[in-house]
Amino acid sequence: MIRSGFLKTRILFAACILAATVASNPGFSQEPAAELRIETAAKQALLVDGETGTVLFQKDPDAPFPPASLAKMMTMEIVFAALRAGELRLDTEFPISEHAWRTGGAPSGSSTMFAKLNSRVPVEALIRGTIVQSANDAAIAIAEGMEGSEEAFAKRMNERAAELGMTASHFVNPTGLPADGQEVTVRDLLTLARHIRGTYPELYKIYAEPAFEWNGIFQRNRNPLLAMELGADGMETGYTEASGYALVGVTEKDGRVTLLAMSGLEKSKERAEEARRLLTWAADAFEPRTLFESGASIGTASVFGGSSGSVPLAVRQPVKLMVPVDAPDRVSAQIRYNGPLIAPIEAGDRVASLEIRVDEQIVLTQALYAGTSVFAGDFADRAMGAVKELAVGWLRAF
């Protein structure tokens, strides 16, 4: 069975210390620095701290929607990985087929880099066209050049998405142009954004380039955040009639990285304004805190059939999160595990998780490990463990 609600004294004490620290720190204003709760016109939204992974705001983060050009983020991950593996080079050239030209080029009326029919374009230029100009002809040329067709490339996109843990997304083409069955979630998109930024930092810098010119046609980056004083350095925008205006944005300011994904806005202006409002709110309403240091023991879990009836639980990494600056009492912690644990248990085994909540919503989950080994007990230990578990189960039934 899953056991939860084990709010050990140490966790509650740490939360109290956290609240007292904020309340007594003269650097914190006693007046609200920002609205502590916020709403958005977006149908789906997820706002996450880049360092700790703390969820700062969420609204239907697992609801699927058509990705539009946000699908090109997955296309770029495939290209970046291929470059790192030596499968591609930046000077590799791919042809602009009639399909790429008609579907995503000048005749299509969609976002395009205006590559000429039957021309050959270096991968480096196709990357910039895809990122800066959200060019459909560039994305299709990449797909055909790497895998022979959009369909084959989409298969590769889905395989890679599964490897990255994007469990609720499915891709049908490299462009995001409307197609049955093509969908993403804002949670998956932020998983992808965080991965790309952290794994390919040099190539990621292209997302911040203000403009790109090809075939004599100059086009500015479509990301509205880049023109705002938010520290934006990426990533992508999208629009479909079915799902409205969408955006994935990343900012880094004063040492803090914040990631935002949102969809379902009615106008491009509304998308820009909502993004600015949410990112500004995140910067003002939260402060970083360390709840537990690396190696700290934060509670115990019950053990069946062992030389000990419990095992201490410890974290390997510091537990850091973003805390509401004027209401740290909204933060709570909970240990969760499938229990009782069965002996033997080796020190260092991953046996539980720590859930951090703000306003009863999970904002951060971190693995917990056995702090010591628990050996298999003798017959008497196992018998006593069975009696205890029977008693607990009997009490639980009522």
Image (spheres, rainbow, N blue to C red):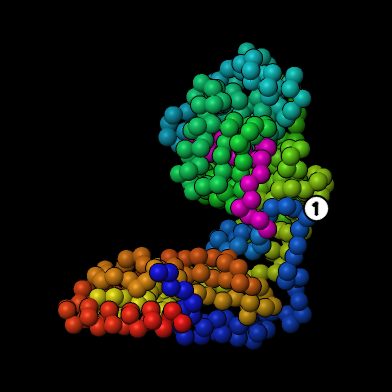
Residue at position x 71%, y 48% from top?
263
> Nearest the camera: 287 or 167?
167
Q: Which residue is mark 1?
A: 273
Residue at position x 69%, y 18% from top?
102
Q: Would residue 151 be found to the left or right of residue 178 on screen?
A: left
Q: Would residue 293 be found to the left or right of residue 150 on screen?
A: left
* Amino acid type for the residue under numbered disc 1: Glu
Residue at position x 74%, y 53% from top?
42
> Nearest the camera: 14 or 6?
6
Q: Is residue 77 magenta?
A: yes
Density class for disc 1 (Cα within 10 Å; few <14, some 14-19, many ≥20) is few
Dominant secondary structure, magenta: helix
Residue at position x 47%, y 28% from top?
88
| Image position, residue 29 (x, y; %) | 73, 80
Residues shaded magenta = 59-81
Q: Is residue 87 magenta?
A: no
For the N terminus, give its image quadrant: bottom left
Q: What count of labels does the image hold?
A: 1
